[in-house]
Amino acid sequence: MITRIALHVIAPENRERALDLLNRNTAMMRKSKGFVSREVYFSTNDPLTCYCVSTFESHEAWADYFKQPGRPSLTFEGEGQDKRIYEDTPDGRFLLFTRAVIDTFERRDPA
């Protein structure tokens, strides 16, 4: 099993679009083969900061989720794991997350 943990800082001017994207992605994940769980946590100190914790049975299942038709068109900009995320739509390009730090984790049981 793998878990992806993503820190997202929402662009205030596109807050509703960003929340809609999180909801759409969660709905699509739940229909994906190999999906285990997804939780979205919002900071009690900063309502524009959230963590998404998504678990899939394998790296392959996670990769297959990204190949699903109908996924939103997103552009990731930035160096390393620290990115800005834009959604590309027929109405234009919208900055949804001013900061996104995403990493993949595997659970290790103590020896």
Image (cartoon, helix red, strand yellow):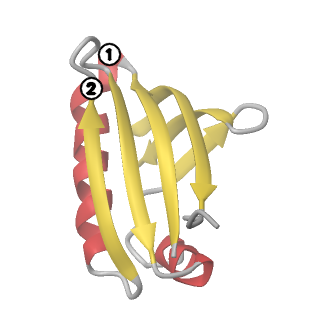
- Residue reaching furthest to the front: 111
Q: Name the residue under label 1.
A: 12
Amino acid type, callout 1: Pro
> Quarter of the image holding residue 84?
top right
Please determine whether, in this image, residue 9 is positioned above or below residue 20. Answer: above
- Residue 1: x %, y % from top left: 51, 76
Q: In this view, does 61 lie to the left or right of 30?
A: right
Kindly report the distance in space between the C-alpha atoms of the residues bearing marks 2 and 1. 5 Å
Which residue is located at x 31 percent, y 20 percent?
Answer: 48
Circles 2 and 1, Cβ within 8 Å, touching? The answer is: yes
Q: Which mark is residue 26?
A: none
Which residue is located at x 40 percent, y 60 percent?
Answer: 54
- Residue reaching furthest to the right: 79
- Residue 13: x %, y % from top left: 32, 16
- Residue 31: x %, y % from top left: 27, 80
Tag 2 secondary structure? helix
Please determine whether, in this image, residue 34 is positioned above or below residue 70. Answer: below
- Answer few, some or many: residues within 10 Å of disc 2's Cα (few below 14, many 20 plus, some between 14 and 19): some
Q: Residue 15 carries which label?
A: 2
Work out whether residue 96 or residue 29 is closer to the camera in this orientation and state it: 29
Amino acid type, callout 2: Arg
Q: In this view, does 79 lie to the left or right of 45?
A: right
Q: In this view, does 17 lie to the left or right of 2?
A: left
